[in-house]
Structures are given as structure tokens and as C-alpha cells.
Image (cartoon, grey):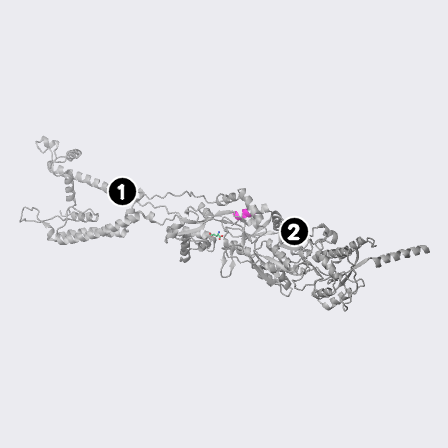
Amino acid sequence: MKIVWQNALLILSFVAYQYFCLSHHSTIGVLRTENYSQIKVPLDYLLDKKNAEYGYFRDDKNNPKSRYEAINELVSKYDSFEASKTLCNMMQNPKGLAAVFGVDSLTSAILQSTCDHFEIPYFITSWRPPTTKVYKTVLNFFPEAKLFAQALSEVVKSLQWNNFVIIYETEEGLIRMQEILKLQTFESTGGKKTNILVKQLGTGADHRSLLKEIKVLTEINIILDCSTENILPILKQAMDVGVLYLGSNVFLTSLDAHTLDYSSLKTTANITTIRLFDNNNPTITNVMKLNKNEIKTETILFHDALLLLTDTVNALLNTNDLTMSPIDCNGPDMSRTGYTIVAYMKHKQPPNDTLSGPLIFDTKTGNRIDFNVHLVEIQDDREIAVWYSNNTLVLTRDFAEASDAAVSNLQKTTVIVASNFLEPYLMERKEEGEILTGNNRYQGYSMDLITEIAKIVNFKFEFHVGNYGPSKLDPKKKKWTGLIGEILERRAHLAISDLTVTHQRREVVDFSMPYMTLGIGILHRKPAKEEVNMFAFLDPFSITVWIYTATLYLIISVVLYFIARMTPGDWENPHPCDEHPEELENTWDISNCMWLTLGSIMTQGSDILTKGISSRICVSMWWFFSLIMVNSYMANLTAFLTKNRMEPTIESAEQLAKQSKVKYGTVDGGATQAFFRDTNYSTYKRMWEMMDSASPSVFEKTNPNGVTRVQNTPRQLYAFLMESTQIEYEIETKCDLRKVGNLLDRKHYGIAMPMNAPYRTAINKAILQLSEKGKLEELKKKWWKDKRTEPSCDNTPIENSDAMDLANVGGIFLVLGIGAALAVVLGLAEFLWNIRNICVEEHITYWEALKVEVKFACCIWKSKKKVKPVTSGSSASGSHKDERIDNKSLVHSIMHSAGSFMNLNN
Ligand code: GLU
């Protein structure tokens, strides 16, 4: 038994000798500011591992190793005196201190300088601002501040945001943002410009007012630089004020942002952050034995720093005597090993099993200059890109994956679609006896299109329909109205209607691929069908003028008759050979007077003219009157007969611009109005000036109002400049309307959505699919033609002929016909009356006289006629009056008879 005890004592002494005298001990000081710190995990893990490698005996002289132990102390974050006292106590450790792992606190500076003084390596594992003060024993495992800022800037660039807001908490945050701020560009030449807004969080816990200021921005992209514990409260407030929605983006610069649980936010906003390590690396979880989303950056950096230190110490033991002895803070500096360790660490090839990637230090400053930054999407915990310290950024997620992520976000929410009531895009649906709810209340092209897109992308949607008015920028309020306003105010995820893609709108919202192509056209009324007016030749004078002229004709004829009777000049010698006649004769009976005045006004003249002075004055005045009247009539007649051709006919925008009779306008505040307002083309500029200055206003609130105005304005004196799609819809059933000329421009309708909306690609793909399948055309046909209840018009263009129709001059033919017929009737009456006279004079029967006269009249070759007719009875009785030998023609005789018939004198 005694021998057993003796042997055991011997072995124990040997072990104690080995352990205390031959083995090398390294004590590592750890200062922490939190009661519970994750660094205990890598600390225990690595020390166990390294000590296990060492074994219990320092038997391998060729490959000496150290045993490690740690002193882990809690220090105050703010009390430098207490912190340095703790450090001094640590340094008095009988085995000395191999290195100190410092803390990120206000006390850090004093700790660094103390360690530097006593040449003890001091390791930092958190961000520190750029400093000119260089401590030889300090190694910073956190990326160098400037390089880190550069990495942040590259990462932000890769997010491709045009505008963003930086919200920072402390001055240090602003230092980290320095390189990002350089992304601000002001390009006036049409290139992309980046606007950066910088805001500092206030001191209180409520940041809602600051977040509300951000809400008005067109694009919500936020870079939030704050402590990890403040992230969730701030994001919750952002949700409350409506800043976080489907399509807004948040980039968190905190390297521990991935450790938070965002599920309580229930946001569809896209949240991204960065990490210095890839937490999908299985080694990390094996080493840390923690949930991968719990592992903090400091823990990883601590692990790597400890790994590097232990490897260094073991390596140095080969060549150096790393004697570490206790240090008195008030005594002289004694150790030289600190410099050796730090210098070796700076130059050493980094170990392969680091968790935060490459570990290379600036040999002068001790700052880490090689590291990777992983850009991660929080919700799906997916890596998007990796930044490498040669300042290259590699996207690790392809475009399709990015789009999938956006789609999955879209599918999680009910997409709000804003729209206006406008035929045929969106109309109210009514079913008899049914109360319709939700999307069932609406129908139309927009409804069908969104339904098709939603089927492809697989999302739920809800229409928000209002009387939003035109989408324009109110220059006074500097706010967008209409559907664009709805998107900007985050009240809708999508907006669809007859929404034209314009560059001004494109600056504040994004548009999907075009689903309809169109251009500005002119809507005008078709020329009214010409009314057939046979008596159009009467139109030059009003009925009153005609009555006055006819009355005047009668009066003047009568006046002339009396004047001619009074004036001696018109009493003539009936037998000019008789120088002293007993009687004078006056040829101006009433029929002659009427003949003369009629001849004058018909511009035909007369074979007899008055000779008396007063009668001549009377006739001249009548001629003067006739001259003016006839010429006025002629002039007016030409105008009236070509009246329709003189109506303003508009066949192009150029013609419209050149004239001022036909007014024209557009929808107020729409894309068409903006086109004319902003154009540089002289014709359209002129048109805009005319429209802008017209009073009353030529602009209409809506397209249907414009259409009604075109229809109701008489004599086609109003044309409406409207988008061709709408014109097509209107002229399909409104047959009094037509589209004039060619389109003035070419543009598209698109679905509006917030700027850089992540679901844009998915919507675009769906539209492309619909277009390829011909669905877009089908929908257009359905709502433009098939679904119309009114009959379609025949819109084949009307041939416009310049020739005058017979109908227009028919009245003149009619007058001639009636006049000629009247003359024939009168001629017959005269003829029969003459026969009556003959039978009375010649004492023959009426029948005999008629036979002779008719027979003679039929002998058209005879131009001479006997005064007394030759009848069968007269020849039998020996009368030798065979034929009339009188030189008077039959016509003369008729005229004479007619003259006597009309002679009122007798
Ligand atoms: N589509 C136009 C717009 O989006 C409205 C109609 C127009 O201006 O002709 O503003």
C-alpha cells in the first residue's frame, strides 16, 4: 500500500513538474461589457481545442505548444477608471497576459494605450473610427473604417436605387456613410441622377415625425444606420406611418441585424442587410453550436482573433522564448513578447479555418484590410451579393431568383389596384337581384387585364376605384394628382386605366411594359348631309328681298307707264311721212313698260326704248337698281351653291393649326395636353398657343365631355384632340363622329407602380405572355367591338366630290320647264282664240277654220301665210284667197293677238 502511495506521489510530482515547470502557459484577458456575451462560446471551444492539441505533457520538443487559459472580466462601458483598474488587475496575473481582447466602448482608448505601454497585444473586434494614432500592439479585426465605408457604398450601388434616405443615429454612423454620400450625382443631361436625403434620428424613442417626412418621397429606399436593438422599434414606427409597404426597401447597416426576428413586423417591404460572414457555412454552426441567426459578428471576429493568436503563440514557441510575467501597472514596462506576437500576427499567413474569411492586416496601422461583405435579404435569409476587398462585387443571386423573391412577397399580400371609371376600361357591373361585392362590382378592359396578370403571377388583388381625375403634377402643391398620386401616396400598388407613359410620370413612378399602343388623333364631326334644296337659286336673297324686288318691278312698270304718257318725247308721229299728223301715238302701253323693265332686270335689254327725258331717267334708275341687284345675286349665288365646300373641312392637324374658325381642345391635365404644352414642333406649338389662349376654354374635364362637345357644337366648329384608342371606341357606335388625319405621335399605356417596384419584372413577364398569346388583342376586340350594345357604324371614308349635284340646280330646270309649259298653254290658247276670230270674220265653221290653221301650222316649210284662210267652202264659192299672202308670220300674228289681248288701253 505504501509503495502504491509512493508511486502515485512520484507520478503526481512528475506531472506537476511537467505542468508547472516545463509547459508554457498563455493567459488571455477578455474584457466584456455585457453580462451575457456570446464570446464565451468560441472562447471555450477554442481553448478546449488548443489545450487538447497540447495534451498534458510538453513532450514534443520540436513542436512546442502552449496551454491557454482565459480571464474573463466584466467592465463598465463608460467608466474608464474602473476599466483600466480591471485591466491592471488582470495584468498582475502570475503567468502574465498573452493578449487582451478589448471591448467596444468609450473606455477602449485608455485600455489600448495601457496595453501599448506595457507591450501587451490588444485586439479589437468592433468598428472603430479612422484614427491617426497608431498603437503597435493593437490589432483591429473589424474591417478598416474607410474600406468598410467603401464596401457599404458598393453594396448600396448594387441595389440600384435612384433615390434614398440615410437615417443615422450617431456621428459614427455618418462616418460610415461617407462613401455612400459620394453616390449623390446631379446629372442634368438626362442621365440617371441619385438623390440622397440624410436624416439623423432624434434623441427620443418616437421617430414617427421623421418617418412621415420620408413618406412623401416618390421612392422609399432607406439606409438605416442604428444600433441593433433600435432596429425593430424604428421599423415598427415606419410601418405605423406607412413607410414600409410592398415595394419599399430598407438596408440595415448593422452587422447583427440578421439576429433580429422581423416576423412581428408583417411587412412586405424588402429588407436587406450585410454580414461579414456567410452563416450558411456549416463550419460556423458546428463551431458555434448556436442557431445560425443568433451568431453575432463580434463572436465570429473573436473566434478568428483567438484562433490567430493561439496559432501565433504556438508558432512563436518554436523560435522565441515567450516568457510572460506579471505586470504592475505602476511599475516599469517589462515585457517584449507583445511586439513579437503582434508583429507575427500581422505578417502571418492567416489560418484556413477562420470564420470571417481572409485575415490580412495593414502592417502599419494594424487595421484589417482584407474581408468579405455579404449582402443578405432578411426575409428569405438569402445572399444577394458578396463584396471582396479588391472592391469587386459579385452578385450571387441571379435575376430569376431576385424576381422570385419579389413575387413571393407579392403573393403574400392583397395587391391594391387603383383605377378610374372610364369606358371601356372600367365600368360598374350590375346584375339584377344580386348585390355585388369586391371586384365583382366592376368590369371592363382594365379588370380583365389585371385578372389575367394576377392569374399568371398568382396574386390576389382588390380594385380601389375613385374619381381620381387627371394624373398631373400640381405646380403649386408640388404634388401629383390622379392615379400617379395614389401610387406615390402608397395607397395603391398598381394603377391601371388609360394611363399614358410620359417621361414626367416616369420620373416618379415605374411603368410596366406597354399593353396598348396609341397616338393623339383628332375627333371631329362628320360633315352634315347636304340638304337637297331645288330652289337653292333663291337663297342668295331673302324672301323679303324677293317680294320687294317683285313689287318694285310692278311699281316701276306702272310709274314708267304714266311717265311715258306724260312726257311729250314718247308721243310719236304714227306716219313719219306726214309732217303734220292729226294724231300722235304712244307705244308705251303697260305691256311694253313691263317688258322693258323685265328685260332690264334679266340683263337682256329690250327692242324698244323710251325717248322722253323723264321716262329715260326712270328707266336708267331701274337699270342701276337692276345692275346692283343682279350682281349681288350672282355673287351670292356662287357662294350659296358652293356653300358646303366652303364649310371648314379639316383633314389634318396642319389644317387645324392654320385656321381659327374651328376651335379645338384636349382633356385638361392629361397626357395629350402635356404633349402640346411641352412640344417644340412649330405647328403643335401654335396649336397649344391657340388652345391656351382660347376663351371660353377649349379644354374638357374628361374625354366623354370632349366627345359631347364635338357632337353638340354646330357646323363642326369644335374638334377634340384625343388618344386614338378612345377615338376608335367612340366612332365605333357614334356615327356622326370621325377620326381626322394621321396620328400626331406614338405612345403607350402602361400599368403604373412605385419606382423600382420589385414585382415589376413579374408584371412585365405576364404582360409579355399575354401579348404573345394574342390575349391583349382579344381583350381589346372584346371591349371595343364585341361587348358594344349599340350598332356599329359604317366608318368607310366618304368620297368628297366637288361637282354640284343635279338636286342643287333642279329648281332652275323646274322654273324653265314650268315657264315653257306656260308658254305652250298660252300659245295654244292664242291659236284657238285666233281661230274663233277667223270663223267669225270668214263666216265659216270653227271646225273648218281649225282644220285649215292646223294644216297650215303643220306645213313647217311655209313661211308665208295668207291674211284670210283658204277653206274648202271659200274655194267652192269662187273665193280666190288660196293662201295668206300677208308677210306676217304666224308667230307675229300670235304675238299681235297676245298684245291686243294684254293691251289694257283698248
Ligand atoms: N391618357 C391620358 C393620360 O394618361 C388622358 C387622356 C388624354 O390626355 O388624352 O393622361
Mark 1, secondary structure of its residue: helix
Mark 2, secondary structure of its residue: strand
> For this view, does 526 lie left or right of residue 843?
right
> For this view, does 727 lie left or right of residue 221?
left
Give the label on residue 71, or none. none
Let me know if residue 834 is in the magenta part: no
For the record, the magenta segment spans: 445-450
Taking the view exactly as shown, the residue that stands out farthest to the top is 876
User: Which residue is nearer to you in this view: 746 or 610?
Assistant: 746
Decide: few, some or many residues near mark 2? Use Cα within 10 Å; few <14, some 14-19, many ≥20.
many
Dominant SS type (magenta): helix
Decide: few, some or many residues near mark 1? Use Cα within 10 Å; few <14, some 14-19, many ≥20.
few
Image coords of residue 700 (percent x, y): 44, 55
- Residue 710 seen in the current view: yes
Which residue does the numbered mark 1 point to in the structure image? 813
Give the label on residue 383, or none. 2
User: Which residue is nearer to you in this view: 121 or 580?
Assistant: 121
